[in-house]
Structure formats: C-alpha cells, structure tokens
Image: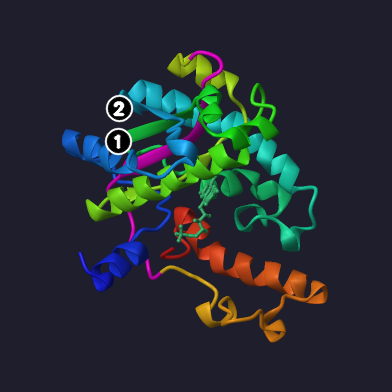
Amino acid sequence: MNYEQFLELARYRRSVRKFKPDPIPDDYVTKILDAAHYAMSGANSQPWEFIVVKNPETRKKIFEVYRKQDLNRIYHIEQQRSARYRHPAFNVAPEEKDMAISMIASWGDAPVLIAVLADPRKQLGSVAASFADISVNLSSVCLASMCHLHMMIHLAAASLGLGSQRVDVIVQEPFRQILGYPEPVRLDTLVPVGYRAYELGPPHRLPLKKLVHYEKYDMAKYLKDEDFLKYLDAIHALGRPGYRVAIGESKG
Ligand SMILES: Cc1cc2nc3c(=O)[nH]c(=O)nc-3n(C[C@H](O)[C@H](O)[C@H](O)COP(=O)(O)O)c2cc1C
C-alpha cells in the first residue's frame, strides 16, 4: 500500500450512523478483529476482548438499552449546557428529544454488533496503571490502548467497504446482563458494523495548517481563551451534518 491509498482509506473511514440490514460475509468480522488485534498497547498489555453479536433479538435488546438508558442520561446531561454549546445532536428543542436520540442512535439495523470489552486487570502489564484506581477506572494508558484498537477496527472495516460507528456507553449493568461478561471485565464500546445506508461526503476537519507548528510553537496559531466559544461553534458546525444524516437532513 502506498501513501495515496492509505490517505484514501483514512478519508473513506467515517462514523457511519445508519446501516443496511443486509448481512455481511462471516469472515469479514474475523478479518476486522484480526487486523485490529495488532494495535499497539501499553507494555503490549492487550487489554481487549470481543463479543460478536449477530442474533437479531440480542442486537435489538442492546439497541433498546442504549436508546432508553444510556442516551436518556446523556440527553439530560447535555440539557445542562446552553443550547448553543450542546453536542450537535442534542442542540434541539425539548419537544424534539426523540429526534435527538434518533440522530445518535440509528444503528439498530446493523447486521453485526461488536461489543468491545476491556479487562482492567490486564492494564497491570504497564506500570503507569498504578496511577489509576483500577477497580473502578481504566488508566490513561489502558484507555489510549483501547483507542488504538478502535482506530484499527474502523480502518479495517472501511478497507472491506463497510461502515462502522463508535458507540460509547455509560451504563454497564444492563449490557452485562444481556451479554454475560463477568466482573471486572467492562464493556468499553459498542461497534455496529454493516454496509452504509447512505452516502458520505469527505470528512470535516479543521485546516491542517492551523494545527501544525514548525520548529517552535507559533503563537499566531494559539487558541486564545476569548476565542474558545468560537472554536466550539466551529467544531459543532463540522460535526452536525454527521448526526443530521440519521433524520435524512444531510449526507453526513
Ligand atoms: C472517543 C470518541 C467517542 C465517540 N463517541 C461517539 C458516540 O458515542 N456516538 C457517535 O455517534 N459517534 C461518536 N464518535 C464519533 C465522532 O463524533 C466522529 O469521529 C467525529 O464527529 C468525526 O467524524 P468522522 O468519524 O465521520 O470522521 C466518537 C469518536 C471518538 C474518537
């Protein structure tokens, strides 16, 4: 693979929030996880495990728990910020709560759901974990390791022409009951995978030249505190189309 091909893959990978119900070949999931498990991790601790869920009833239960419990909490947390600065999917009138939830959770048709698990004990492979209360939290090294894994999952899915989404969860117990993973193993993230149900344009990013400094920090590029709210406006504007796609208002 050359740089142009890699760049094309990096730009093709998007957060896909709506899927066709069509099944994907069985070996695609194995291929995704095989590539992903070569991700780097602190002290090679490899804190991850996976549950591949294809059973439609189980997927439905998980989707409903996410919509009803997880997103309900996030909705109420977001209401504590003024509307302008809420997460782009939650910047709606109170009577549009269901629409906000649909913008974030419309992956129910994805034919495969990968539950990505983390075992906090495995982070003890890295001494940096001793700075975290690992009975409750994942250390920053462990979280970073999980993030490296995720990028590999999404790139591998994109390389197979598939879409995927990262779905972060807050509640644990309902998912634990459905999926049966024991303590202290935790659900890190849900990853729906399937064929994309809509067209995506190019990814929305801030211009690279604003982010790169050469030889020394260029203070002309420093984000001043008084400009921070403008920055929030800018990133929310970039992210908004990706969420509105679920309600048919944009291409993503
Ligand atoms: C740590 C992290 C958490 C995220 N959580 C969610 C999520 O819970 N739901 C979601 O729809 N997208 C989530 N995203 C996706 C981002 O919104 C998305 O990556 C960003 O808007 C850029 O769009 P793109 O992935 O299409 O390029 C998350 C991404 C990261 C890296």
Q: Amino acid at mark 2?
A: Lys
The residue depicted at 30 percent of the width and 63 percent of the height is: 9
Please, which residue is most extreme toward the bottom here? 220
The image quarter containing residue 93 is: bottom right
In this rendering, the count of numbered labels is 2
User: Left or right: 190 with respect to 84?
Assistant: left
Q: How is the image coloured?
A: rainbow
Q: Is residue 105 visible?
A: no
The residue depicted at 36 percent of the width and 48 percent of the height is: 152
Q: What percent of the width, then of the height, locates residue 228?
A: 76, 70
Q: Which portion, as a residue range, is magenta?
A: 182-202
Q: Is residue 225 above or below residue 67?
A: below
Q: What percent of the width, then of the height, locates residue 105?
A: 50, 43
User: Left or right: 214 with respect to 95?
Assistant: left
| Residue identifier under label 2 | 54
Q: Is residue 160 above or below residue 224?
A: above
**Is the Cβ of the residue at disc 2 closer than 8 Å to that at disc 1?**
yes
Q: What percent of the width, then of the height, locates residue 15?
A: 43, 54
Numbered badge on residue 52? none
